[in-house]
Structure formats: C-alpha cells, structure tokens
Image (cartoon, helix red, strand yellow):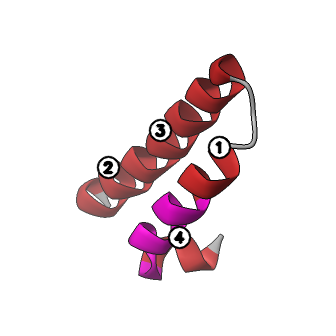
Amino acid sequence: MIAVHHHPTGLLKTAKSVGFQYPTTLRLFHIGYVLGVIYGFLLAWHLF
C-alpha cells in the first residue's frame, strides 16, 4: 500500500490492465474502488 503514495500512475495502469480481465460489472466496480482509494488518500493527505 506504500507504493500507492509514490506511484499513483503505475497503480492506475495496473488497475486498468487487471480490470480488462474481468466482466464489465466487476471491472467497473474495480475501477471505482481504485479511484475511491486514491481520492481517499488525496483527501487524507490534504486534510491532515
């Protein structure tokens, strides 16, 4: 999880490549989850 802070673009590329292996519904859920985690880290970083 530490890598998330330093390589967000790499995480997105990994999420996209992994996401294409799943059906559409699971792919959308996976992308939404990843984006939610990234936004959560950004909010926490700005607030604290």
Q: Earlier in the sequence, mark 1 or mark 3?
A: 1
Q: Earlier in the sequence, mark 2 or mark 1?
A: 1
Residue 45 located left or right of residue 33: left
How dense is the environment of label 4, judged by Cα within 10 Å: few (below 14), some, or many (20 and up)?
Answer: some
Task: Give the residue displayed 66% in from the left and 70% down from the top.
Answer: 1
Res 27 → quadrant: top right
CA–CA distance in space, label 2 to label 1: 24 Å
Residue 36 located left or right of residue 42: right
Dot 3: what SS? helix
Q: Mark 1 is on which residue type?
A: Gly
Q: Earlier in the sequence, mark 2 or mark 4?
A: 4
CA–CA distance in space, label 2 to label 4: 14 Å
Q: Position of residue 44 (x, y in %)?
A: 38, 54
Q: In front of the other: label 3 or label 2?
A: 3
Q: Mark 4 is on which residue type?
A: Val
Q: Which residues are magenta?
A: 6-14
Task: Give the residue displayed 43% in from the left and 69% down from the top.
Answer: 8
Tell whether position 36 is magenta. no
- The residue beneath circle 4 is 4
- The residue beneath circle 2 is 43
Q: Mark 2 is on which residue type?
A: Leu
Q: Position of residue 45 (x, y in %)?
A: 33, 63
- The residue beneath circle 1 is 19
Q: Mark 3 is on which residue type?
A: Gly
Residue with the most extreme left position: 46
Instruction: Please give the label number shown on residue 36.
Output: 3
Q: In front of the other: label 2 or label 4?
A: 4
